[in-house]
Every structure is written in structure tokens, then in C-alpha cells.
Image (cartoon, rainbow, N blue to C red):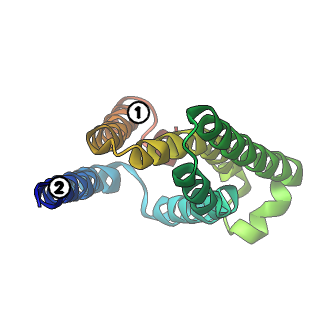
Amino acid sequence: MLSLLAQLKRLAGDSFLYALMSVSTKLIAFIMFPIYTHYIQPDEYGVLGIIDGTIAILGYFVIFGTDTALAFYYFEEKDPQKKLQYVQNVMAFRLLVSVILTIVALLAGNNLVPWLNINSHLMPFFYLSLVTLVLDSINVLALTVYRYEMRTLRVVLLTVAKMLFIAVLSYFLLVYWSGSIGSIVW
């Protein structure tokens, strides 16, 4: 019975932390919204949305079901070295796919302009977002492993800290650097 109570207590605590993480990240976005709308031109909202949406779709190709496969093998395996090997293989796959997508986009160049429906002078922002896709694949996998290891507080703190860092950096770049979507993408 004590075990059940301990598990319920952990479930409630973890649920609270994940809810706090969700509310915190949405609160950061809510606070940043008027700042973005003040500094960004209305025609740039759509461009930023197209770039973000395209990167989100490409993120599915990077993940490609490896999170589910990793969970299956990770929880079945007892040997820490094998678990590490599984994580390294997933990381290698995700990095390979994200780098290939970035190279293909760079080689395609302005041929992607009609497909993305953005001006060619904004393509560097799309390329920069592809680089963040490579970096974010590392971050997402690390957070996934922390989730598997039941390190809820670490997941919440890292996620909120990342969002807060991005918001603060975006603010300073918008206000003191360029006042365009380039500030947000950077």
C-alpha cells in the first residue's frame, strides 16, 4: 500500500511540474506577443509562421518515430552501456537526417521560394532555422532521456530556461539589433 501511495505522490508531483512547465512556456509566449507585434511588420508575421511551420514539419522527419523506438528498447534494456548505445544511435540518426535536410535546402536555394511562398531575401532566415533544427534535435533527445530517467524537475527547469533564454535574447535582438524577424530567428 505504501508503494501505491508513493507512486500516486510522484504522479501528482510530476503532473504538477509538467503543468507548471506548460503554463510557464505559454506565459512567456504571451508576454512576448505584444513585444513581437510592436517591432515586427505585419507582413513578417506570416513569413515567420511559414518558417516555423516548415521547420516543425521537418522536425517530424528528423524524429521519424525514433522516440517510440528508443522508449521500447530503453525500458527493456538493463545494461546502462546498451542504453547509452541506443541513445547514441538515435542521436546519430537524427543529426544525420537534420544535416541532410539542411544540405538539400541549401543546394535547392531559391528554388524553394515558390514552395515556401516567401521572398528570396528572407531565405537566409529559413536556412538559419534549419541550423536550429540540427541543434534542437540534440536538446529534444536529451530531454527525452531525462524523461525516461524520471528526472522531471530537470526537464521542467531546462525547458523553461530554454524558453526564457530565447525570449530574453529575442527581446534584446529586436530592440537593440534589427527589429525584424531576423532577430527572432537568431
Task: Give the CA separation, mark 2 to mark 1.
Answer: 50 Å
| Residue toward you, 169 or 43 | 169
- How many dots with numbers? 2
Which residue, given by chain and number where applicable, does mark 1 sit on?
Answer: 173
Location of the N terminus (image quadrant):
bottom left
The quarter holding residue 110 reads bottom right
Q: Is residue 182 visible?
A: no
What residue lies at 34% left-to-right and 46% top-to-bottom? 150
The quarter holding residue 72 reads bottom right
**Left or right: 139 in relation to 125:** left
What residue lies at 14% left-to-right and 53% top-to-bottom? 6
**Left or right: 105 in relation to 91:** right
- Report x, y in % for residue 46: 51, 66
- Report x, y in % for residue 85: 67, 37
- The amino acid marked with disc number 2 is Ser
What residue lies at 61% left-to-right and 54% top-to-bottom? 73
What residue lies at 49% left-to-right and 48% top-to-bottom? 181
| Residue toward you, 180 or 139 | 139
List the single residue furthest toward the right.
Answer: 107
- The amino acid marked with disc number 1 is Leu
Note whether 96 is above or below 110 in the view shown: above
Q: Are marks 2 and 1 in contact (CB under 8 Å)?
A: no
| Residue toward you, 37 or 186 | 186
Mark 1 is surrounded, within 10 Å at the Cα level, by few (under 14), some (14 to 19) or many (20 or more) other residues, namely some
Secondary structure of the residue carrying tag 1 is helix
Marks 2 and 1, the one that precedes in the sequence: 2
- Report x, y in % for residue 13: 15, 53
- Report x, y in % for residue 35: 28, 49
The quarter holding residue 27 reads bottom left
Which residue, given by chain and number where applicable, does mark 2 sit on?
Answer: 3
Secondary structure of the residue carrying tag 2 is helix
